[in-house]
């Protein structure tokens, strides 16, 4: 099967496995894992923040951030289909006692006016912005719109968390440094097990004080590790080898869109949003193509490290035989 369900299905490459095997390790809970410390140092610098923390997953990074930035009873406001609101099992309410409020927004992008109008948003609350925005099809936040949303949140006294699970995709697509977005937010999550091809691992960056508070969350959630350098080595390898190549995934997404009759301009990064049809997912699977769910009424085909041009051409051929939208 040509697996376009998600960019999380990738397997570690030989080079990545070799880096993991050669990793220098220590006890992370004693803050004595040298490879983890090096990764955290590099990521803090890259993201324009004082400190960074390794976490096993982006979900845990998001939840540790919300816990560090907020007070129980306050609000978390985000576009209604952001990952923190609908795919993290009520974590903001359960772990941090937050009132969760979702707002409908085009392409996942909250406007300053929307943020200004939210009632009961203030100090102790947080606005979460997701870039790229998963459920709108991997869309990129233009920097000026992002800045305006951050300023609106600040004007309300709320903190800002950037769920940048796929921030490197946004960066490569827009030709803008990741720190241009991340330095504006109080905290930022980066996921390494999506387009970057790691088996697991995420980074949370923020001020030294916030990251100290996030350490508490890391322990509380059971995410404090021991020889975490094995993961950190894979992540460092991905930083050096798998970031620039995201441009290939984006080009392949555009080619796939075009090949199946979808406007290629809608594939801003590595997602192709496909209008759903009755039993479409099952019919594509029968023809040897796996696609995933995007949002109600829409499926997604996601390009990634384990798929080359040849697989994309094969996928187009197989999908054309099934889809009614193709030209
Ligand atoms: C935007 C976004 N944030 C966070 C996550 C959570 O990542 P993880 O599976 O590493 O917890 C995902 C996963 O799909 C995501 O798409």
Image (cartoon, rainbow, N blue to C red):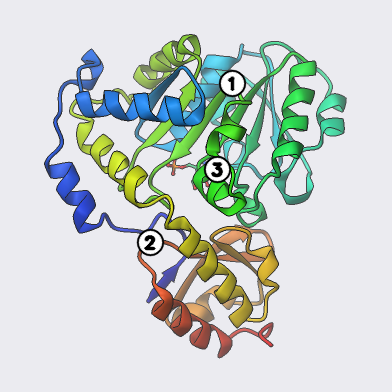
- Res 64 visible: no
Q: Quadrant of the C terminus?
A: bottom right
Sequence-wise, the earlier of marks 1 and 2 is: 1
Residue 175 percent coordinates (x, y)? 58, 49
Toward the viewer: 287 or 180? 180
Q: Which residue corresponds to the image point at 66% horizontal and 12% vertical from the top-left?
A: 124
- Crowd band around label 3 with a 10 angstrom C-alpha radius: few (<14), some (14–19), many (20+): few
Ligand 1 within 8 Å of disc 3? The answer is yes
132 to 149, vertically: above or below: below
Give the foreground label among 3 and 2.
2
Q: Quadrant of the N terminus?
A: bottom left
Left or right: 273 in relation to 22? right
| Kind of element beneath mark 1 | loop
Residue indicated by mark 2: 305
- Report how far apart the C-alphas of labels 1 and 3 lie in the structure: 22 Å
Residue 120, quarter of picture: top right
Sequence-wise, the earlier of marks 3 and 2 is: 3
Q: Which residue corresponds to the image point at 23% horizontal and 50% vertical from the top-left?
A: 16
| Kind of element beneath mark 2 | loop
Q: Which residue corresponds to the image point at 87% horizontal and 32% vertical from the top-left?
A: 113
| Kind of element beneath mark 3 | loop
Residue indicated by mark 1: 186
- Report how far apart the C-alphas of labels 1 and 2 lie in the structure: 30 Å
Q: Which residue corresponds to the image point at 49% horizontal and 59% vertical from the top-left?
A: 247
Residue 115 percent coordinates (x, y)? 81, 28
Tags 1 and 2 in contact by the CB under 8 Å rule? no
Which numbered dot is residue 87? Answer: 3
Ligand 1 within 8 Å of disc 1? The answer is no
């Amino acid at each position: 099967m040509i697996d376009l369900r998600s960019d999380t299905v990738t397997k570690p490459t030989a080079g990545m496995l070799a880096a993991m095997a050669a990793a220098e390790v220590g006890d992370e809970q004693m803050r004595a894992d040298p490879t983890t410390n090096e990764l955290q140092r590099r990521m803090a610098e890259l993201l324009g923040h004082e400190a960074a923390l390794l976490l096993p997953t982006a979900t845990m990074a998001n939840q540790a951030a919300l816990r560090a930035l907020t007070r129980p009873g306050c609000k978390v406001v985000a576009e209604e289909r952001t990952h923190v609101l609908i795919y993290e099992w009520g974590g903001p309410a359960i772990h941090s006692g937050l009132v969760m409020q979702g707002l409908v927004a085009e392409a996942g992008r909250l406007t300053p006016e929307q943020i200004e109008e939210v009632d009961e948003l203030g100090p102790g609350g947080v606005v979460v912005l997701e870039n790229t925005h998963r459920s709108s099809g991997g869309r990129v936040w233009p920097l000026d719109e992002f800045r305006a949303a951050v300023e609106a949140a600040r004007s309300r006294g709320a903190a800002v968390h950037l769920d940048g699970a796929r921030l490197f995709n946004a960066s490569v697509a827009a030709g803008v440094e990741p720190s241009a977005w991340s330095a504006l937010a109080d905290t930022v999550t980066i996921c390494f097990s999506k387009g970057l091809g790691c088996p697991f691992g995420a980074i949370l960056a923020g001020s030294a004080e916030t990251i100290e508070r996030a350490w508490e969350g890391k322990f509380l959630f059971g995410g404090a590790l021991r020889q975490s350098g094995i993961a950190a080595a894979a992540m460092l390898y991905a930083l050096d080898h798998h970031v620039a190549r995201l441009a290939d995934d984006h080009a392949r997404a555009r080619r796939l869109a075009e090949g199946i009759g979808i406007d290629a301009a809608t594939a801003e990064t590595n997602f192709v949003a496909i209008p759903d049809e009755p039993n479409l997912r099952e019919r594509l699977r029968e023809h040897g193509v796996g696609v995933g769910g995007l949002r109600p009424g829409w499926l997604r085909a996601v390009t990634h490290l384990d798929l080359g041009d040849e697989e994309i051409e094969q996928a187009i051929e197989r999908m054309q035989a099934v889809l009614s939208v193709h030209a």
